[in-house]
Image (spheres, coloured by chain):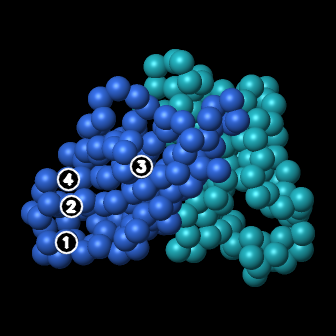
Chain colours: A cyan, B blue
Amino acid sequence: AAGVIQSPRHLIKEKRETATLKCYPIPRHDTVYWYQQGPGQDPQFLISFYEKMQSDKGSIPDRFSAQQFSDYHSELNMSSLELGDSALYFCASSLPLGLAGGGEQYFGPGTRLTVT
Amino acid sequence: AQSVTQPDIHITVSEGASLELRCNYSYGATPYLFWYVQSPGQGLQLLLKYFSGDTLVQGIKGFEAEFKRSQSSFNLRKPSVHWSDAAEYFCAVAAPYNQGGKLIFGQGTELSVKP
């Protein structure tokens, strides 16, 4: 079965550089979530999109922005990178509640971002 | 606000022994609850979920969980642990879907399995 695809899997950037993380949801999933997981921590919600509109926003720095495109893939743009941005970034996708399997979030393998 | 607490940071069990991982949640209405498993450096795999109905839910890999509203708990169990079950386990509650449906995770429980 198709899974959530994230690219790149690993990314090394220097401080003050920019990074773009991409997420391709499971086909027919119209909702995308982004999470950040620091070392030894639980995943923290950043932002979500439903039908290409932002649906919720968590503790996402102003330096970060994201969008969902017409084909439902999503991109997380990170600027002025800081050492503290080093983390595993997950994308998850889901079907709407009310559909069979709806509400379940399926996670991609993550992008490991290292800022030096 | 919704929250999840996993009281045990690290648990060690012997292979073949039974397992119970604790999870307590705080939520104003009927919660949507999940257990995920994460191997080192890997993504999160959904083990099972509770939305409504039968309070004992079965998942993949022989796991089950029981929703107890009176105790605000959703503990994960497995009757006989295998060495391959060693991983980090996260309990999560979903925010209402009309508020975006984000997952709020507990701190995680690291499971080690002794031969």
Asked if residue B16 lies left or right of residue B71, the reply is left
Which residue in the structure is indicated by mark 2? B19
Chain under label 4? B
Q: Position of residue B37 (x, y in %)?
A: 39, 55
Q: Residues within 10 Å of mark 4 (few under 14, many from 20)?
A: some
Q: CA distance from mark 1 to mark 4?
A: 11 Å
Which residue in the structure is indicated by mark 4? B78
Which residue in the structure is indicated by mark 1? B13
Q: Are marks 2 and 1 in contact (CB under 8 Å)?
A: yes
What is the secondary structure assignment of the residue under circle 1?
A: strand
Going by the picture, which residue comes out furthest to the top?
Answer: A99
Chain under label 3? B
Please tell me whether mark 3 or mark 4 is closer to you in this view: 3
Q: Earlier in the sequence, mark 2 or mark 1?
A: 1
At 61% from the left edge and 64% from the top edge, which residue is drawn? A37
Q: Is residue B16 above or below residue B62?
A: below
